[in-house]
Image (cartoon, grey):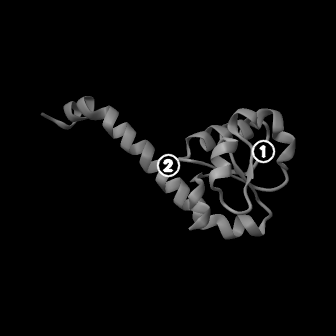
Amino acid sequence: MDLSDLFQKYWPILALCGWFGYKWWNSKKVVAMLPTLKKNGATFVDVRSAAEFASANAPGTINIPLQELGSRLGEIPKSAPVVLCCASGSRSGMAKLLLKKNGYPEVYNIGAWRKFLA
């Protein structure tokens, strides 16, 4: 069995590992940038549901659930960086796409909200 056969057989697993590796690397990068982002007046938005946010959240974050984000964009200034979080990074990834599509120039996905506490 050559490398091509292995890739054809295991490409879904390799793609999944690559995706999770990227998410891990990207969130580590954003965590390292937090002091600078805070200094630059970043807005921190948690896109989990109101119930999830009420059960536990990071200090300084505002809660705008993902399903409400499109109608509440006016609450998030475009003039400062925006850092998004949720439970795992998936919803905040979708929120990042929405904000970028709506003209927000500097948007970051930190992934899980607990990373703000690190």
The amino acid beneath tag 2 is Lys
Front-most of 111 and 26?
A: 111
Q: Residue furthest left?
A: 1
How many labels sit on residues?
A: 2
Label 2, secondary structure: give it.
helix
Determine the residue positioned at 40% across, 44% down. Answer: 18
Question: Can residue 20 be seen in the rendering of this structure?
Answer: yes
Which mark sits nearer the N-terminus, 2 or 1? 2
Q: Which mark is residue 115?
A: none
Against 36, residue 110 (above or below) is above
What is the secondary structure assignment of the residue under circle 1?
loop
Q: Are marks 2 and 1 in contact (CB under 8 Å)?
A: no
Amino acid type, residue under disc 1 in the picture = Tyr
Q: CA distance from mark 2 to mark 1?
A: 21 Å
- Asked whether 102 or 50 is in front, the reply is 50
Q: Nearer the viewer, residue 16 or 73?
A: 73
Quadrant assignment for the C terminus:
bottom right
Is residue 108 at all visible to an observer of this figure?
no
Residue 14 x %, y %: 33, 39
Spot occupied by residue 75 in the image (x, y as percentages of width and height)? 85, 46
Please give the name of the residue rendered at 38% of the width and 39% of the height, measured from the top-left corner.
16
Residue holding disc 1: 104
Query: In the image, 68: left or right of 5?
Result: right
Residue 117 in which image quadrant = bottom right
Residue 23 — which label?
A: 2
Q: Residue at the spot x=57%, y=59% of the render?
A: 114
Neighbour class for label 2 at 10 Å: few (<14), some, many (≥20)? some
Circle 1: is it few (<14), some (14-19), or many (20+) Cα within 10 Å?
Answer: some
Residue 11's place in the image compared with 92, above or below, is above
